[in-house]
Image (cartoon, rainbow, N blue to C red):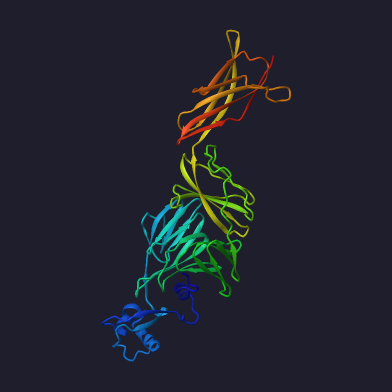
Amino acid sequence: MFLSISPAFAQSRDPAPSAETLDYQVQPGDTLIDLATAYLNRPTDYRQVQRRNRVADPRQLAIGRTLAFPVELLRADPDQARVAGFRGDVTLRQGASTAAPIQGQTVSEGAVLTTGANAFMRLALSDGSHVVVPSNSRVRLTRLRRYAINGAVDHAMTVEAGRAESRVTPRRRPGGFVVRTPVSVSAVRGTDFRVAFNDGADRSTTEVLEGRVEVESGDGLTEATAVAAEGVTATATSARPVPLLPAPSLLRPDEVQSGPHPLFAIEALSGADRYRGRLATDAGMIDAFAETDSASGETRLTYDGLADGAYFLRLSALSPEGVEGRSTTYSFIRARNGVGGLASSNSMQDGRRFYRFRWEAEGEGEANFRFQLSREDAQGAREGAPLIDQPGLTDQAFTLSDLPPGVYTWRVQGSRHRFGRLLQVWSEPQQLRIGR
């Protein structure tokens, strides 16, 4: 279900009163005055309900009769949210206080959530809905209310910078869920969607993953509807529906990330300007800890400082307008395995010349090595099979003697078992020249 103008939407403006009503069935002992005291903004508002429903005596109501209460008269009491998780540089401003949040902390209407680079915050709303504030974003909770008449929740927030991702539990009338930006309003009753605001372009994007969303331009004169796999780009004067890009694919999804920096090569997707990757320790992205976008036109993502372990990558593509498409999630293993610090030296002993080759293992866990030495021809190409091919080394060094003059190349392979996988990698070839 969806609501083109939710109660929160209507109450945030000051035009003509909303015509939306909520039906109430009279119970034994009810009087219109008691109902107004319990459920309306002011006890005296019962007079408007009396006129609308043509009630002769406000103190005598027929049991089972249906009364139509204007939604604008219904009292909505303060509701609260809860900090369900966070990571990285996150601040929460409530009133005059600004500080890092605390797990499980109560969050009230008017709070401002701010995240830095590679930081995330997740809010749990009182009805089971969740809001994720990704990195480099600022979101203000403009309305957290619960209607006294039936407990329906009514929530609204403003994305002042960056993005917000919402998974909204279907809501009872007259409750609703609204996400605003400086140039748009997105209203729903229950769905999974994202809203982003690009301050530089003065444009917002709404992307619907599940359900249905109504989006209005900032001036309220243009409206567009998006369902699953659709989005809307909006400015202060326009709102235009667009299809979401399909989920992109990794070129080597089973590859162990063993290099100095994890690198994910992406199959180019038609219509994509760049790609976005979010890392988490769980497939649901609840414990997300890093996010990066590729440069425009690039088809790879890199991350720094990722410790060994099992992780998940959520991959999506963005259009030139910044609309993020559908995503797919990959599991992957990060296990550093490298060979670096290669060096060679020589020395004389008992009239013989010895050549010592050294290297350094990069990564965790025990490793063994394979040493290869090949000779180059006059054109710099390798001459046939390696002269030396020695596997099963445990030391990070190997010594040879009495090599004849010539040009050689040597390299080392490092092998280790991690996470149930055999990891193998060759070093970069090194050149050795021996004169007469």
Q: In the displayed structure, does residue 56 sit left or right of residue 253?
A: left
Picture quarter containing residue 398? top right
* Residue sticking out furthest to the right: 379
Q: Where is residue 274 in the image (x, y as percent from the top left)?
A: 61, 52
Could you tell whether 72 is left or right of 345 in the image? left
Pick the front one: 312 or 156: 312
Q: Which residue is rendered at x = 56% and y = 74% of the image?
A: 220
Q: Name the one closer to the observer, 227 or 126.
A: 227
Q: Residue lying farthest top? A: 350
The image position of residue 393, as x and y in percent, is 51, 22
Q: Number of numbered discs present?
A: 0
Residue at the image position 62 percent from the left and 19 percent from the top: 387
Relative to residue 322, is residue 364 depicted above or below?
above
Against 414, is 215 above or below? Answer: below
Across and down, in percent, residue 327 comes to 53, 54
Q: Which of 118 and 36 is in front in this view?
A: 36
In the picture, residue 339 is in which quadrant? Answer: top right
Where does the C terminus fall, quadrant-wise?
top right
Q: Residue furthest bottom?
A: 56
